[in-house]
Image (spheres, grey):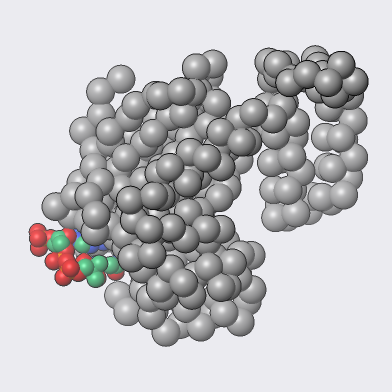
């Protein structure tokens, strides 16, 4: 598939998605969001892909937000549609992906850019990255899940401070508060992301998918995460990966998982 605003490449079972609008600091316009939806959902059915890394082109920005020029004229109904469509087609799709997705935050991750990173399962940031939800300085609020995911990741008090002040935080501060999992030198974020992803991909893909669903259940209104955990735990016992994992342990060899 050809993309206008994404560079997409599979290497060693990792799908690398690079948001490629460097002159606009990789801002998420409509075309980019549609392309992200396609690239990510297609990977779900591609057995050659075991996990994904999302990053931004260039040294300056991961993604500097939703494309402000595209929502300058929207009315309330159009604003609602923009947020709903973005959440359901991109941000929730990433959060609920059964294949692990890592955000390699190579620079500014602002507004929709930080929301994109927060929807990923794990975040690795460059020492030079800056993160924030500056929407209230534009007279709006985060609309791609930022109010919810930031509170989940760093707690309500810190999230409210970041959202209400619209201030950016450094990578070191983001690490201190749990907003990012790791901080590396800028030239090492991809290799650190690969190291993490390869470790996850060496485990049972079946169990990894069950674990993602069980963890995510905590954040689904009306769902009892403990019950979800019980049923996902039970699912694992019916998998070929479970038989293989236990057999490999007993035979003192490396497991060859199939994800089935
Ligand atoms: N939407 C659309 N265009 C954007 C953008 C966004 N979110 N963020 C940056 N750009 C564009 C700029 O308009 C500029 O385009 P131009 O060269 O055609 O004028 C280009 O990217 C470079 O950005 P610039 O502002 O000149 O870079 P800078 O180094 O001076 O500042 C930032 C960098 C990130 C601080 C600044 O671009 C910024 O504040 N961006 C908006 C962040 C934001 O509010 N995001 C949330 C949106 S909801």
Single out the residue that lies furthest toward the left: 23
For the image, the number of numbered tags is 0
Above or below, 133 against 191 in this view is: below
Single out the residue that lies furthest toward the front: 252
Q: Residue at x 63, y 36 (%)?
A: 200
Where is residue 221? Give x, y as percent. 73, 55
Q: Residue at x 39, y 49 (%)?
A: 188
| Closer to us: 244 or 42 | 244
Q: Is residue 97 left or right of residue 254?
A: left
The quadrant in which the C terminus is found is top right
Where is residue 12? Give x, y as percent. 46, 23
Q: Residue at x 74, y 40 (%)?
A: 211
Where is residue 177? Give x, y as percent. 57, 73
Above or below, 133 against 68 in this view is: below
Q: Quadrant of residue 243?
A: top right
Ligand 1 quarter of the rendering: bottom left
Where is residue 49? Give x, y as percent. 50, 23
The quadrant in which the N terminus is found is top left
Above or below, 199 against 206 in this view is: below
Above or below, 63 against 260 in this view is: below
Q: Is residue 70 left or right of residue 37?
A: left
Q: Is residue 57 visible?
A: yes
Q: Residue at x 53, y 68 (%)?
A: 175
Q: Is residue 67 left or right of residue 171?
A: left
Q: Is residue 252 left or right of residue 128?
A: right
| Closer to us: 198 or 148 | 198
Q: Quadrant of residue 238?
A: top right
| Closer to us: 21 or 223 | 21
């Amino acid at each position: 598939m050809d993309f206008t605003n994404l560079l997409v490449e599979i290497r060693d079972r990792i799908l690398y998605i690079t948001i490629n609008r460097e002159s606009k600091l990789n801002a998420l316009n409509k075309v980019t969001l549609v392309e992200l939806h396609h690239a990510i959902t297609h990977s779900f059915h591609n057995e050659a892909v075991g996990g994904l890394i999302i990053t931004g082109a260039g040294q300056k920005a991961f993604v500097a937000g939703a494309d402000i020029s595209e929502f300058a004229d929207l009315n309330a109904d159009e604003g609602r549609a923009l947020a709903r469509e973005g959440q359901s087609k991109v941000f929730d799709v990433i959060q609920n992906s059964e294949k692990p997705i890592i955000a390699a935050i190579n620079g500014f991750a602002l507004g929709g850019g930080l929301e994109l990173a927060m929807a990923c399962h794990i975040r690795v940031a460059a020492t030079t990255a800056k993160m924030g939800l500056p929407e209230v300085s534009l007279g709006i609020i985060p609309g791609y899940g930022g109010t919810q995911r930031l509170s989940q990741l760093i707690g309500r008090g810190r999230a409210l401070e970041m959202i209400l002040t619209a201030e950016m935080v450094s990578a070191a501060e983001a690490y201190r508060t749990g907003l990012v999992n790791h901080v590396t030198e800028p030239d090492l974020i991809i290799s650190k992301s690969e190291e993490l992803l390869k470790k996850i991909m060496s485990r049972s893909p079946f169990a990894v998918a069950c674990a993602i669903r069980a963890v995510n259940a905590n954040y689904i209104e009306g769902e009892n995460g403990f019950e979800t955990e019980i049923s996902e735990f039970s699912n694992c016992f019916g998998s070929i990966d479970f038989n293989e994992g236990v057999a490999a342990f007993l035979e003192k060899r490396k497991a060859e998982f199939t994800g089935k």
